[in-house]
Amino acid sequence: MYVEQAVSKATESSGSVINQMVNEFLTFRLGSEEYGIEILKVQEIRGYDAITQIANAPDFIKGVVNLRGIIVPIIDMRIKFRLGNATYDQFTVVIILNVAGRVVGIVVDGVSDVISLETEQMRPAPGLGSVIDTEYIMGLGTVGERMLILIDIEKLISSGDMGLIEQSIN
């Protein structure tokens, strides 16, 4: 009897820990949609400035910048997600990320804010079959009337089609 109560209490307390888990996301805009990436992957946010283009790079890789001695590839997320032509204005920013030990920049239309999402505010990515590639979508987050598309930025950046991070051969 005593052991059953202890197990029950442990389950209740560990369940409440899971329910209390909060994830912080940096939100940004691409067109009319809002996206979120884990804040812990973000190194800094910079304005969009001169980028050195690289010959024969895929369309979505705009080029590279020299960030305090580190050569950083810059990816245009609007082109990567096939959201139409990117227009660069005073709101366009580059989010510098540290992903899998590699520093990479992503160009977005604008940064909104940092949002804390509790577990009950996050939903799994909808199963859309083979029509839409949801491989890089962690899920959907809701804050009031806002719907955020939560991107697994590590999976996206380390994907084979990006070619930015060496795949280990085991």
Image (spheres, grey):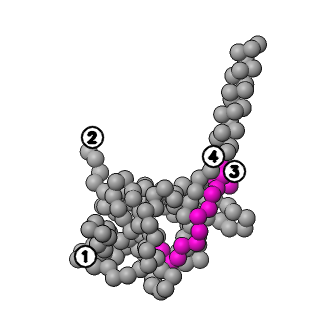
Q: What element carries label 3?
A: helix
Q: Which amino acid type is shown beneath numbered disc 1? A: Ile
In the rendered image, the quadrant that contains the C terminus is top left
Q: Quadrant of residue 16?
A: top right
Q: Mark 4 points at which residue?
A: 21
**What whole-number distance in Å separates the C-alpha atoms at marks 2 and 3?**
38 Å
Report the residue at 32% width, 79% height from top: 51
Tell me residue 18's x, y (percent): 64, 41
Q: Which amino acid type is shown beneath numbered disc 2? A: Asn
Label whose residue precedes the other's in the sequence (3 or 4): 4
Q: Which amino acid type is shown beneath numbered disc 3? A: Glu
Tell me residue 122's x, y (percent): 64, 54
Q: Which amino acid type is shown beneath numbered disc 4? A: Met
**What whole-number distance in Å separates the C-alpha atoms at marks 1 and 4?**
42 Å
In the rendered image, the quadrant that contains the N terminus is top right
Residue 109 belongs to magenta span: yes
Give the extent of the magenta segment: 108-123
Q: Nearer the viewer, mark 2 or mark 3?
A: 3
Compared to residue 153, the image places residue 33 above or below, namely: below
Q: Name the residue under label 2.
A: 170
Q: Name the residue under label 1.
A: 54
Q: Which of marks 1 and 4 is in front?
A: 4
